[in-house]
Amino acid sequence: MHFVSGSTGNKALHNTLKNNDIMSRNDADHGDNDSGAWGVLLNASGNEVAHNSFSGNIACSEDYGIEGASVEIYHAGNNLIRHNSSVNDSTFSELGGQSEGNTFAFNLFAPLNETSQKAAEFLIVPGNKGTRVYNNTAYKVQVGLACFRTCDTSVLDFRNNIVVGASNARKSEFYSDAVPLESHNVFGRIDAFPQYFSGGSSPPASTLLLSAGQTNTLFVSSSESNFRLGASSAAVDAGNPELTFLAELGISTDLDNRPVPYGRAPDAGAYERQY
């Protein structure tokens, strides 16, 4: 586990972070306070977590049954989490405390095995202002994006992502209790129609809610864990053609380090299709 506390400018780069099952707190007091089993824990601001591989960061929890995350953020702001691959972790990231201005870009999260499916949460945002989420791919999730405590445009900017729920997903692929900035995303569910809620508003025209058949053709081969875009994928050229929000982060390549965009517009998700 990487632990960053009280300092800025740190970088966690090109690591393999797996099988951490150590809990920092795990007791049977029936409180909502168990925590641990992280790949990276950020208790500091202005840091970067990039090009890492996460897997198996999961432990048993008295409060939740299962606990763990690829990147846990608590009282930490203005961090950049980008170009990471997480397979078979229970949660990609959960924000807590005064954690504002964090950015997630070009990450892959795929909780594929039975253990990780017990949680399978992509991103939990309890009202943390300035959270930006761009060009991520989340596959077979039970919980996609869950944003609450007045999740309006000051809290969330969610663009160019792919979120595909498990066939029996217990919650939404996208849930926001208010109306945030959300556009150019692709939502689906294995063998079913995705669930989408954004403060009671309809999705923008640029956001796609796919039928089961369309979801099945999104990727080259999800059964072989190849989440690059297929030839007929609905995510090709589905991203926002205005790229200033990526340029501001100094990001110009996808998870395979290929240029974005390749075609007339960027693709949705963590991979840019190369024709």
Image (tube, rainbow, N blue to C red):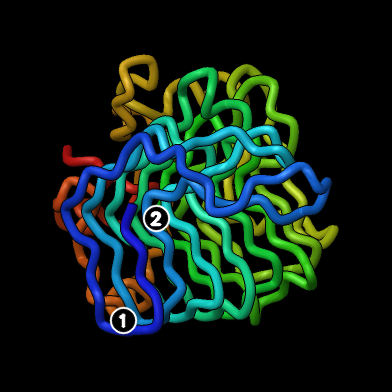
Nearer the observer, 138 or 19: 19
Residue 135: image location, x then y, percent: 39, 55
- The residue type indicated by label 1 comes to Glu
Query: What mark, if any, has residue 84 been given in the picture?
Result: none
94 up-or-down from 109: above or below: below
Quadrant position of the C terminus in the picture: top left
Earlier sequence position, callout 1 versus callout 2: 2
Q: Is residue 110 left or right of residue 84?
A: right
One can see residue 90 in this view: yes
CB contact under 8 Å: marks 1 and 2: no
Nearer the observer, 17 or 133: 17
One can see residue 189 in this view: no
According to the picture, the residue beneath numbered tag 2 turns out to be 135
Residue 268: image location, x then y, percent: 40, 49
- The residue type indicated by label 2 comes to Asn
Residue 119: image location, x then y, percent: 62, 34
Q: Residues within 10 Å of mark 2 (few under 14, many from 20)?
A: many
Residue drawn at (81%, 48%), measured in percent from left and top?
A: 29
Secondary structure at numbered mark 2: loop
Secondary structure at numbered mark 1: loop
According to the picture, the residue beneath numbered tag 1 turns out to be 248
Residue 10: image location, x then y, percent: 25, 76
Count of labels in the image: 2
Residue drawn at (39%, 47%), measured in percent from left and top?
A: 269
